[in-house]
Amino acid sequence: MIVRLIVFVAIFFIGWWLYRRFVAFKGSQSPTKAKTQESSKKDESQESMVRCEECQTFTPRSHAIHDQDARPFCSAEHLKVFNQKH
């Protein structure tokens, strides 16, 4: 009976010690540093958007079609329609 109690108390203190070490480790990491890393990851994955000259909707720059004057269009059809109007 006493042996079980001693084992239980030892397990409890080892668990408590591990918990405190974990909290100290998490506290040593700067929250602003973690946020900066998250925002830089988002910035790298985000792409700038351009507005179609015909329908005024936004399209990712890599998907846009540009004319000779570097005006962006969301599709080849809108480029044709724009060129027919002007």
Image: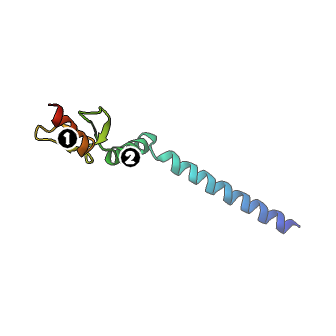
Q: How many marks?
A: 2
Mark 1 or 2: in front is 1
Residue at which label 1 appears: 80
Q: In the rendered structure, which amino acid carries the disc numbered 1?
A: Lys
State the image coordinates of residue 70 (x, y, percent, origin top left).
Answer: 14, 39
State the image coordinates of residue 66 (x, y, percent, origin top left).
Answer: 18, 42
Which of the 4 image quadrants contains residue 38?
A: top left
Residue at image location 77% in from the left, 59% down from the top: 9
In the picture, the quarter occupied by the C terminus is top left
Q: Is residue 47 left or right of residue 80?
A: right
Q: Is residue 13 left or right of residue 66?
A: right
Residue at image location 72% in from the left, 62% down from the top: 11
Check disc 1 and report its element: helix, strand or loop.
Answer: helix
Is residue 60 or residue 37 the one in the foreground? 60
Do the residues under discs 1 and 2 have CB atoms within 8 angstroms?
A: no
State the image coordinates of residue 32 (x, y, percent, origin top left).
Answer: 42, 39
Q: In the rendered structure, which amino acid carries the disc numbered 2?
A: Gln
State the image coordinates of residue 45 (x, y, percent, origin top left).
Answer: 34, 48
Residue at which label 2 appears: 37
How crowded pointer 1 is (Cα within 10 Å; few <14, some 14-19, many 20+) is rated as few
Give me the C-alpha separation between circle 1 and circle 2. Answer: 43 Å
Residue at image location 21% in from the left, 45% down from the top: 65
In the picture, the quarter occupied by the N terminus is bottom right
Q: Residue furthest right?
A: 1
How crowded pointer 2 is (Cα within 10 Å; few <14, some 14-19, many 20+) is rated as few
Give the color scheme: rainbow, by chain, secondary structure or one colour. Answer: rainbow
Q: Residue furthest left?
A: 68
Mark with earlier residue (1, 2):
2
